[in-house]
Image (spheres, rainbow, N blue to C red):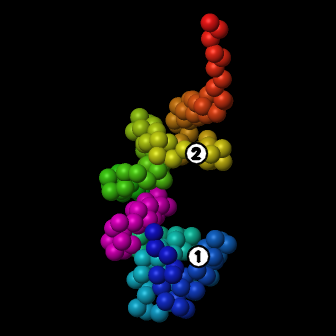
C-alpha cells in the first residue's frame, strides 16, 4: 500500500486532505483536493486510488473503473487495484465481471482475506453457494474475526443464502475460543 509521504510537500498534504474528505463522506471535496496535486504526481498510485474512490462515491462509475484499472496496471503488487475494479463493476451491476476480477486477484494475493471475503459475496450473489462457502472459509482461515467482524458478517445481505453455514462456523469458532481460553487444571494422581 502506498503512503502519502511518498509524495513531496505540498502534494502529500493534498493527498492526506483528500483522504480525510473521503472519510467525512465528502468525495467532491476530495476531488478538489486531488486536483491541487502537481501534474507530475497525478499518476501516483495513491492519487489514483483516492480519485477512483471519490469517483465511485459520486457515482462516476465509468471514470472510477478506468482509474481502478490504471491502478492495477501501474501497481500490480498492490491488491487495491483489483479490489477497486471489483467494487466499480458491482456498482455498475456487472457482477459476473466483478466476480472474475476477484478470481484473478486471489491468484495473485492468496493470503488476502478481504479479497476472499468479497469473492464469497460475489459467488453467493451469483448463486454459486458451494463456491461462496469455500471462499468464506478461506477468508476465515486467513483472518480471525473479532465480535464486531462477526456481527458485520452475520448481517451481510450478500451472504444471506449461506448464512446458516456461516452461523455454524461462528458457533464452532466460539466453542473453540471458550475451550482454549479456559485454563487447564490437572490433578496429580494419588499414588
In the rendered structure, which segment of residues is drawn in magenta? 69-93
- Count the numbered circles shown: 2
Q: Is the residue marked by circle 2 packed among few (<14), some (14-19), or many (20+) residues within 10 Å?
A: some
In the picture, the quarter occupied by the C terminus is: top right
Residue at left 62%, top 28%?
Answer: 179
Closest to the observer, 158 or 60: 158
In the displayed structure, does residue 24 sit left or right of residue 131?
right
Q: Residue 19 carries which label?
A: 1
Q: Position of residue 62 (x, y in %)?
A: 43, 72
Q: Where is residue 76 in the image (x, y as percent from the top left)?
A: 33, 67
SS for dot 1: helix
Specify which label sits upstream in the sequence, 1 or 2: 1
In the picture, the quarter occupied by the N terminus is: bottom left
Residue 78 among magenta residues:
yes
Q: As displayed, is residue 123 above or below residue 79?
A: above
Residue 112 at least partly seen: yes
Q: Residue 189 carries which label?
A: none
Per the model, the C-alpha gap separating discs 1 and 2 is 26 Å
Task: Determine which residue is flagged by label 2.
Answer: 145
Residue 76 among magenta residues:
yes
Residue at left 66%, top 29%?
Answer: 183
SS for dot 2: loop
Q: Position of residue 95 (x, y in %)?
A: 42, 53
Closest to the observer, 79 or 119: 79
Magenta segment, prevailing SS (helix, strand or loop): helix
Q: As displayed, is residue 133 above or below residue 87?
A: above
Res 160 → quadrant: top right
Residue 51 at least partly seen: no
Q: As displayed, is residue 96 above or below residue 35?
A: above
Res 23 → quadrant: bottom right
Residue at left 42%, top 81%?
Answer: 44
Amino acid at each position: 500500500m502506498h503512503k502519502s509521504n511518498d509524495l513531496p510537500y505540498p502534494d502529500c498534504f493534498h493527498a492526506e486532505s483528500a483522504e480525510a474528505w473521503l472519510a467525512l463522506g465528502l468525495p467532491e471535496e476530495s476531488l478538489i483536493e486531488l486536483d491541487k496535486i502537481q501534474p507530475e504526481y497525478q499518476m501516483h498510485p495513491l492519487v489514483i486510488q483516492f480519485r477512483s474512490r471519490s469517483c465511485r462515491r459520486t457515482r462516476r462509475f465509468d471514470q472510477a473503473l478506468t482509474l481502478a484499472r490504471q491502478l492495477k496496471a501501474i501497481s500490480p503488487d498492490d491488491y487495491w487495484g483489483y479490489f477497486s475494479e471489483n467494487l466499480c463493476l458491482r456498482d455498475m451491476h456487472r457482477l459476473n465481471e466483478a466476480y472474475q476480477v476477484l478470481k484473478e486477484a486471489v491468484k495473485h494475493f492468496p493470503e488476502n482475506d478481504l479479497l476472499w471475503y468479497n469473492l464469497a459475496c460475489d459467488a453467493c450473489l451469483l448463486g454459486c453457494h458451494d463456491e461462496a462457502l469455500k471462499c468464506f472459509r478461506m477468508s476465515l482461515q486467513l483472518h480471525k474475526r473479532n465480535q464486531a467482524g462477526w456481527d458485520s458478517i452475520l448481517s451481510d445481505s450478500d451472504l444471506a443464502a449461506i448464512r446458516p453455514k456461516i452461523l455454524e462456523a461462528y458457533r464452532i469458532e466460539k466453542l473453540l475460543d471458550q475451550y482454549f481460553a479456559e485454563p487447564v487444571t490437572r490433578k496429580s494422581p494419588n499414588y
